[in-house]
Amino acid sequence: MRKFLMFFIVFGVFIGIVIGASNEINKVDEVESGDNQIVTEVIPKIRLALAGVDTFNPLTTQNEHVSNVLRLVYEPLFEYDYENQLKPCLASEYFKRGDNSWVIRLQPGVEWQDGNILLADDVVYTINYLKDENVNSVYKANVRNISSVERLDTETVVINLIEDDPYIMSKLYFPIVSSRSIATTDEVQALTPQSLIGTGPYEFVSEDAEKVLLKLNDTWWNYKGAKLKEIELMKYGSYAEAVKAFKSTEIDLIMTDMYSWKEKFGFIGINSYSYESSTFETLIPNTSKTGLSESSVRKAILQAINRANIVSVVYEENATIKDIPIPSYSKFKTESSDYNIEKAKQILVNAGWSNVSGSWKKGNQTLSFNLAVVESNKEQVLVAEKIKNDLQEIGIKISIKKMNWNDFSSAIANGNFDLAVATFDVKNEYQIQDMVKSVASKNYAKYSNQNMDALVEKLTTTQEEIYDETMENFIATYLNEMPYIGLYFKNNTMLANKSVKGEYKSTASNPFNNLINFYK
């Protein structure tokens, strides 16, 4: 049975990953080998910038770039592979027991970095810690449906749910901490790196006012070799200071979500690696409204929007056009539609719409909509203006409604809109199932389709061997129905000085997936 990641919808400005890294190398003395060749040993030490650290507690940090760096030290029960598919990490297997209970067995013999063995008690402790009403954590929603967690034996836990949730395994991607490393919630702000013990590829060694030193955990249970032996987490008060450090070569690698990074960093002596973030921008159509209830109208709108122009002008090519929120590196990736005004018009004609004096009409219906956007989000306001111009070019009338965040959120929740420019945080393609299921709370488009509901139900209950076929049918139905009018994934960029070596591979859920194999 395949399990999926729950998603959180976010409207407005996306807070991107702001992490830097660099390599410092130490060379041994040059020596002559038997054939008089000079041999130089290179020992890499990479420097990552930590800006605005709040706490090193991986469960309570509110700083996204700190959280991403701490993935080098801590591991979850489940994670995502390079095809964006959920797979066990610290968990080894799992199965359902009764209507609302799941049994999870742990990988046997996994060691904490203090030499103790990972036990079921640690998982119980972590989940109960997150459920504590005094703990403020970004993972709070992940455990909200868990009524209790109990130890079955030293390597097995039972998770009891308030109500059935086929996605529960995919919500267990938060870091597991040792029950001995965090004693009480009162100690959160006083935690030191040495007190936080993980199971991951790197472990804390020391800390001073300027940096935290990590070293390779050579007893890591999943160790398959590594080039990178040490990491220095350099402390900065702000991201601007980290940028300055990169430009002065104190930092050799840096990630940015800035679209105009060439203006900020320059490009001479720099290699850039762009990858799709989890930030997906879309038009939400209120499918309960006249006109937008027709899939033909939604598909015509998609064809009529010049997304390539938006990506070029607004995001300086730092976005990837997508009809459906499935990233290009996914196992289930799809091709995107091209901008085609004539095709958009023909779709409407085929659906019985007539262009009368520059407006599309069918009976007493007219294609005229308001377009909601958060007024403080300047990029999305510009996107809305371009969408308005594109749609009016083919005769679909648009009136932009700029709203404050609270009014926008209320309008989306209550269905008081026609179209809306919105941003979703989509780390896995299966999150879209909650977007289209008729009774789902996250179905902001008010979309309802019996065939789609049946496919979603089958995806949550089907066996492995027919899952892929069901997913392909789901995607085909989505593209035919277009319940959301997809725009693009925003891209993040890794910048590296040319001396840095290593094939960069990233997923939106873990930007430092293969940092272990970098060198200089």
Image (tube, rainbow, N blue to C red):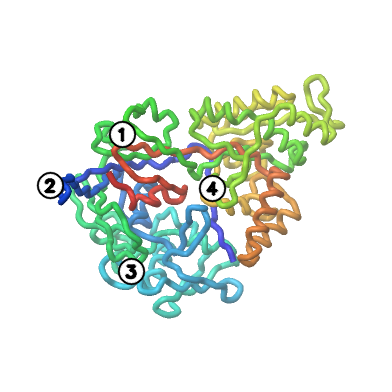
Q: Bin the neighbour count of mark 1 within 10 Å (Cα to Cα): few under 14, some 14-19, many 20 and up.
A: many
> What residue sits 33% from the left and 64% below the top?
199
Callout 4: helix, strand or loop?
loop
What's the distance in space between the residues labelled 4 and 1, CA to CA?
28 Å
Name which residue type carries label 2. Asp
Which corner quadrant of the image does residue 256 belong to?
top left
Name which residue type carries label 1. Val
Disc 2 vs disc 1: which is toward the camera?
Answer: 2
Q: Nearer the viewer, residue 110 or 293?
A: 110
- Which residue position holds label 2? 29
Q: Earlier in the sequence, mark 2 or mark 1?
A: 2
Which corner quadrant of the image does residue 109 belong to?
bottom left
Q: Earlier in the sequence, mark 1 or mark 3?
A: 3
Q: Earlier in the sequence, mark 3 or mark 4?
A: 3
Callout 1: helix, strand or loop?
helix
Disc 2 vs disc 4: which is toward the camera?
Answer: 2
- Which residue position holds label 1? 243
- Which residue position holds label 3? 179
Callout 3: helix, strand or loop?
loop
Q: Does residue 407 appear anywhere in the picture? A: no
Disc 3 vs disc 4: which is toward the camera?
Answer: 4
Please give left or right for residue 447 compared with residue 203 in the image. right
Callout 2: helix, strand or loop?
loop
Q: Nearer the viewer, residue 321 or 516?
A: 516
- Which residue position holds label 4? 426
